[in-house]
Amino acid sequence: MTALTLSTAAVAGLRADAIVIGVAKGSASKPGGPVVAPGAEAVVQAYDGNLAGVLETLGASGAEGEVTKLPAPAGFKAPLVLAVGLGAQPQKDSGYGAEALRRAAGAAARALSGTKKAAFALPLTDPADAGAVAEGVLLGAYSFDAYKDQGDAKNGKAPLAEAALLGGKPRDKAYKAAVERAVAVSEELNRARDLINTPPNDLNPEAFAAVAQAAAKEHGIKVQVLDEKALVKGGYGGILGVGAGSASGPRLVKLSYTSSKAKKHLALVGKGITYDSGGISLKPAGHNETMKCDMSGAAAVFAAVVAAARLGLEVNVTGWLALAENMPSGSATRPGDVLRMYSGKTVEVLNTDAEGRLVLADALWAASQEKPDAIVDVATLTGAMVLALGSRTFGIMANDDDFRAVVREAAEEAGEPAWPMPLPEHLRKGMESSTADIANMGERMGGGLVAGLFLREFVGEGITWAHLDIAGPAFNEGGPFGYTPKGGTGSAVRTLVRLAERAAAGELS
Ligand code: BES
Ligand code: MN
Ligand code: ZN
C-alpha cells in the first residue's frame, strides 16, 4: 500500500513526481470559472497568481473527480501539478468536508498510478480532514491485478508508492492519530476488497476461514472455526442446508476481539456466500457473473474486527462469518425441503436462491447466545434493495428506531451513503408456510424488507439489532469513481468501524 507521511515541507522544494491541489467550482462572484482551493497558495503564487485562469484555459471546471494535469511552474522540483475537482465550494468557513476531500484524494491517487511520489496540498481544516485525505489516497490507489500476467504493476501502472500530506501538523497528536487510524482502516478495507475480488475457485469457505485464522493470530484476536462436522453436531441447519450442494463444505467463523476496558459488546454478523449460483433455483445467465461478491458482508465484518483490534478500541467486538457456497448438485437442498435451524425453528426452503437469510439466521442466533449490547448484520441480501436504493446506497433495517438512527449516523460520519428502511409487519404473512414455522420467501414486492423481517425472527429476545443490505454498493460494475475502484468496494467496513468507536464511547443508543 501507499506509504503516507504528514509533511510541513515547502511545496516548491519538494522532491516528488507530482503536486496535487484542489480546485472547486466557481462561485456567484466568479460564475463558471474554477477556483483554486486553500492549501495551494504557494502553487498559485508560482503561477504569478493566475492559476485559476490557467486551469480555465485547460478546460477545468472544478467538478467533482475531474483531473487536470499541468506542468509545474519554474523553480519547482516536482515536474507536474495535478488539479483535482472538489465540486461546489463550501458555505462560508465550513471547510470542504471530509467526504469531498476523501473522494478528491482518491481520484487523484488513481490518476497518479504509475507514479512514485506525490504531495497532496488539499484544503485541510482539522485532523479529521487529514484522516479523510489519507483514506482517500490509500483507498483510491488500490488495484487488484493478482490474476493478470501483465498486470498494472508490470505495465508501469503500479499504485502510487508514496504520498506526503501537506497542510497538516505532523507533531500534533490528533493529526498523527487521524492518519494512523486511516492507515489501519484502509489496509483492512483493501484486504476485504482483495477477498471479494478473489475468484470463487480460489476462495471457498475453507480458504476464507484460513485467511481469517491467520489474521486473527497476527492481531491477537481469538478465533474459532466450526467445520461441517462441528456444524452438524451443533445443529446449524441453515448454514448446512445452503452448503449442501457444494463440493466445498461450509464454515462458521467466530472472531472475538476483547478489550480489558470494554463497557460494551458489539456483535457483527456477515453473509459469506463465496459463490451464489442460486442453487437448484439456479440464477439465469447474466445474474451470476458477479456472484463471487456474495461474501462481501463477511469480508466487511472480518475487516472491521481486525481494524478494531489494530486501533485498540475499548469495546468487545465479536465477528461471525457465515461461510458457504450455494451450488446445485445431487446433494443440494431442494425447493420444498425443510431445514431445522440452529434456533430450533423450521424453515421451508421455497427458493434456494434466498440462501443468505438462511446462513445469517444461524449466525444471528449464535451471536444472540452471548447477549451482546447490539448485533449488526451485513449482507448482499436482495436484488430488491438494489432496485430501491441503486448501486451506491445501502439500506438499514432494525428492530429499534433509535439504533437504526445511530447506524445511519455512523454511516454518515464514515462517508458511506445509507438510508433507513422499514420492516412493515404486514409483509410477515407472505412468509407463512403450511409445512414449517416460516418459509424463506414472501411477497416479491418489498423483497428487501421481507428478507429483513425473516432475519428479525432469528435475533434473540430483547437484543437490539440492525441489518445492512449492501447488495447495491458492495460490488462496482461500472467504472471507478472517487476512491471507489471497479469490483469489490469494501462497502460497510468504515460504517462498522465507526459504530465500534461509538460503542467504545458508550454511544450505541
Ligand atoms: N446474493 C443475492 C442478492 C444479490 C443480488 C446480491 C444482486 C448482489 C447483487 C441473493 O442471494 C438473492 O439471490 N436474492 C434473491 C432473493 C429472492 C429469491 C427472494 C433476489 O434478490 O432475487
Ligand atoms: Mn441467492
Ligand atoms: Zn446470495
Image: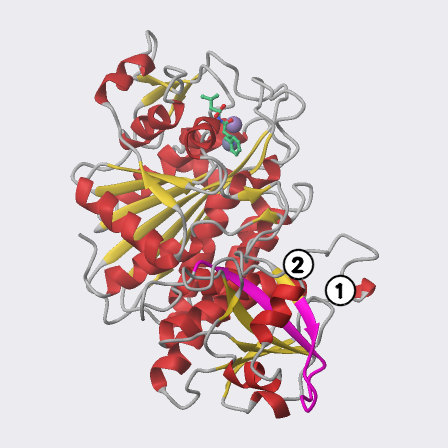
| Quadrant into which the N terminus falls | bottom right
Q: Which mark is residue 157?
A: 1
**Residue kind at label 1, given as amino acid type:** Lys
Query: Relative to 501, is 195 on the left or the right?
Result: right
Q: Which residue is mark 2?
A: 143
Magenta region? 69-88
- Helix, strand or loop status at disc 2: loop
Colour setting: secondary structure
Q: Is residue 148 magenta?
A: no
Instruction: Decide which of 120, 322 is in the foreground and name it.
Output: 120
Helix, strand or loop under label 1: loop
Above or below residue 73? Residue 100 is above
Task: Determine whether the beta carbon of the residue marked 2 sits less than 8 angstroms from the nearest atom of ligand 1.
Answer: no
Q: Is residue 507 visible?
A: yes
Question: Residue 333: x, y in percent?
Answer: 52, 20
Q: Is residue 453 left or right of residue 309?
A: left
Front residue of 480 and 40: 40
Front residue (pair 172, 379): 172
Image x and y of residue 222, in percent: 40, 61
Residue 181 visible? The answer is no
Question: x and y percent of residue 495 in the render?
Answer: 37, 54
Looking at the image, how many numbered discs can be counted on the residues?
Answer: 2
x, y percentage for residue 369? 26, 44
Ligand 1 closer than 8 Å to label 1 CB: no
**Mark 1 and mark 2 residues within 8 Å of each other at the beta carbon:** yes
Residue type indicated by callout 2: Ser
